[in-house]
Image (cartoon, rainbow, N blue to C red):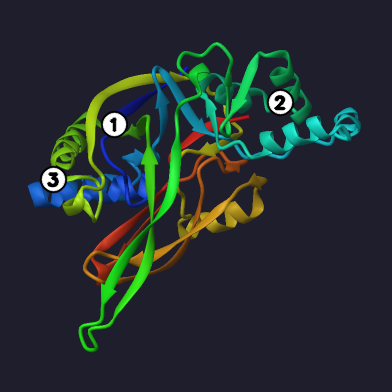
Amino acid sequence: MTTHTAVILSPESNFMAEVDSIKIFGSIASALSELDRDKFDRFYSSVKTGETRISSSFPLIKDTHLFPMPIYSFEYDKDLSEKSEDIEVFTKIKEIKKTEFVSQSVFEEILNNKPKLGDILEKIESGEWGLDKKCLYLDEEDGLEEKNFLIKRYEIPKNVLNRYTYGSTIFYSQAHFYNCDLFFLVKTSKDILKLINAALKLLEDRGMSQDFSIGFGKFMLRDIKEIELNEPGGGGMTLLSKYHPDENEIELINSCNKYYQIKEIKGFTNNGFHIPPYIFFREGSYFKLNGIKGKLIDIPDARTSLNGIAYYIKSR
């Protein structure tokens, strides 16, 4: 068993962006810079060196932690291939492949054993595992049988005014709605954890969003506690955060066995500075490596940083 520090949040409004490791780091750094510049420097330095690592946030349903579905290759199964000619079986296989979240028990099972697609289907058909709303879980796990949690992404119309012509243009931003608690994991020292706690207390009042002035990003800090995960001895790793390789890691990443998804991050700060596009590996990506660090990307003109430091779990 490996111990991790979990920070639990209860959303009280919508968020204008995905609450991932980039968003969480940026919000904490911004809050600390307002509280005390020395505290910000200590936090920033600990993240840059990899001493402090922050995961993305994931749903928490009652006492059941959900994690991203690990990305890995399913081996060819002749028997399953023949069964999939049945339309109901074929539909269920498609649903399994679209799974976004798994409960902690299922997550640990996948990390340690990497079950075949046919094994997962068999567990679902037998009633041992449940599959609903792109979530895979043990059927008896508390809260999940209610099947009432929801993560919804939707578009919000906004209006921009041209200061020269006074013409207006409508554009759209993506918002995220959660009707469940969220948690993210932290690996750090006790001193830095105290700084993170102080920053979150400020963000409770202000909001974790550039649009906090109109009510977005509100949350309540519910708890900070330790949880245990049954991780295998090693051999590989599964990401629980966004990850941008450091220059000296690129060759390792190129040469190792891996299964992954990527996401391009770009945009503008609330001051109007442009953030050029950067490629990040997404949560759930797998690398056959024993350890990676990642990179904190500084964007001097925008006076901001993108957190590409990896938070990972050991995998088989």
Say which quarter of the image contains residue 246. bottom left
313 relative to 41, above or below: above
Q: Which amino acid does label 1 sit on?
A: Leu
Q: Which of marks 1 and 3 is in front?
A: 1
Query: Split into 4 quadrants, where in the image is the C terminus?
Result: top right
206 relative to 132, above or below: below
Q: Which amino acid does label 2 sit on?
A: Pro
Say which quarter of the image contains residue 311. top left
- Tag 2: Cα neighbours inside 10 Å, few (<14), some, or many (≥20)? some
Q: Residue 223 carries which label?
A: none
Q: Nearer the viewer, mark 2 or mark 1?
A: 1
Residue drawn where x is 68% and y is 28% of the image: 114
> Do callouts 1 and 3 mark residues in contact (Cβ within 8 Å)?
no
Residue toward you, 167 or 178: 167
Residue that carries the numbered disc 1 in the rendered image:
9
Q: What element carries label 3?
A: helix
Sequence-wise, the earlier of marks 1 and 3 is 1
Q: Report how far apart the C-alphas of labels 2 and 1 lie in the structure.
A: 32 Å
Residue toward you, 305 or 66: 66
Residue that carries the numbered disc 3 in the rendered image:
39
Q: Report how far apart the C-alphas of labels 1 and 3 lie in the structure.
A: 22 Å
Say which quarter of the image contains residue 77. top right
168 relative to 233, above or below: below
Q: Where is residue 36? Give x, y as percent.
A: 8, 48
Q: What residue type is labelled 3?
A: Lys
Q: Is 41 positioned to the left or the right of 171 in the image?
A: left
Q: What element carries label 1?
A: strand
| Residue at far bottom of view | 165
Residue drawn where x is 29% and y is 31% of the image: 9
Q: Residue 115 carries which label?
A: 2
Residue drawn where x is 46% and y is 55% of the image: 244
Q: Nearer the viewer, mark 2 or mark 3?
A: 2
